[in-house]
Amino acid sequence: MDILSILGIVLSIVAIVGGQYLEGGHLSSIMQFTAFLIVMGGTLGAVMLNYPMPIFMKALSSIGMVFGNVHVDMKGIISKIVELSNISRKQGLLALEGQMKTIQDPLMAKGVQLVVDGTEPPKIREILEVEVGIFEEEYLLAGKVYESLGGYAPTVGIIGAVLGLIHVMENLADPSKLGSGIAVAFVATVYGVGSANLFFLPMGGKIKMKAKELVMGKLMVIEGLISVAQGENPRMIEEKLSGFLPTSEKKKK
């Protein structure tokens, strides 16, 4: 679990609710179901209109990336690539076919099969990079869905506030209701701006960042397999792939 995401949400809610309490406000004054319905329903509807079904569903399934940890075992990738390089150097590229069952990563398995089939290194890179490009684009679009939610929510919040004010203007004959009515109207704006900046935009940003980490691991696989196909020295391959490691990991090497 990504504890930072949980802490971020908790901190933001506590800060706002706590600030409301310290100012003498009541939680009930910002708990308005009608405003919530207008903002969330309107925002969701706008995004559903903006994106096709596959992208929208991908965004929904990607929410796990916000609250779950994404870990790429880069050292494990380097170790496996070096192992494949040693086998190919000693027994030839065809010997790599026997290693297919031990490879869990679909991209690496596909790449090894291309190497075994004698595909030219530039062609291997081209084929695998197309697959990685599609993978990256799917997650970038998923992140953009949440960013779109963050873009529409404040505007829909203003619509909710205007609707509330219209309702207030219809009751001008009863001055006792004006203050509370106006307060309720502006709750919609709070919901719109708050949901956008505290939830939707950060969620989209985190999905994009974690997707980049996954893509980095895949690019490492491609670079390693190209080096194996070219018959490079295993030690040189290890040094090259070590360049993908974060600075903190390089120090532990």
Image (cartoon, rainbow, N blue to C red):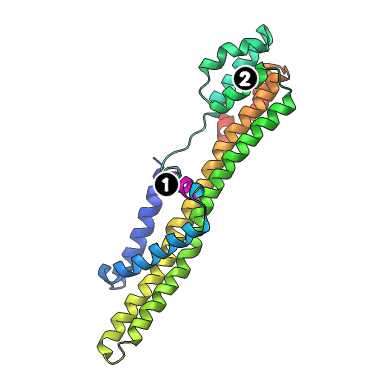
Residue at the extreme bottom of the image, as rendered: 173
Three-letter residue code for mark 1: Leu
Q: Secondary structure at mark 2?
A: helix
Image position, residue 168 (x, y; %): 33, 84
Three-letter residue code for mark 2: Gln
State the predominant SS element of the stretch in magenta.
helix
Relative height, residue 29 to residue 165 (above, below): above
Mark 1 vs 2, N-terminal side: 1
* Residue at figure coordinates x 62%, y 18% from the top left: 82
Q: How many marks?
A: 2
Residue on which the image places disc 2: 113
* Residue 236 in view here: no
* 116 left or right of 18 in image: right
* Residue at figure coordinates x 56%, y 47% from the top left: 140
Residue on which the image places disc 1: 4
Residue 121 found in image quarter: top right
Residue 233 found in image quarter: top right
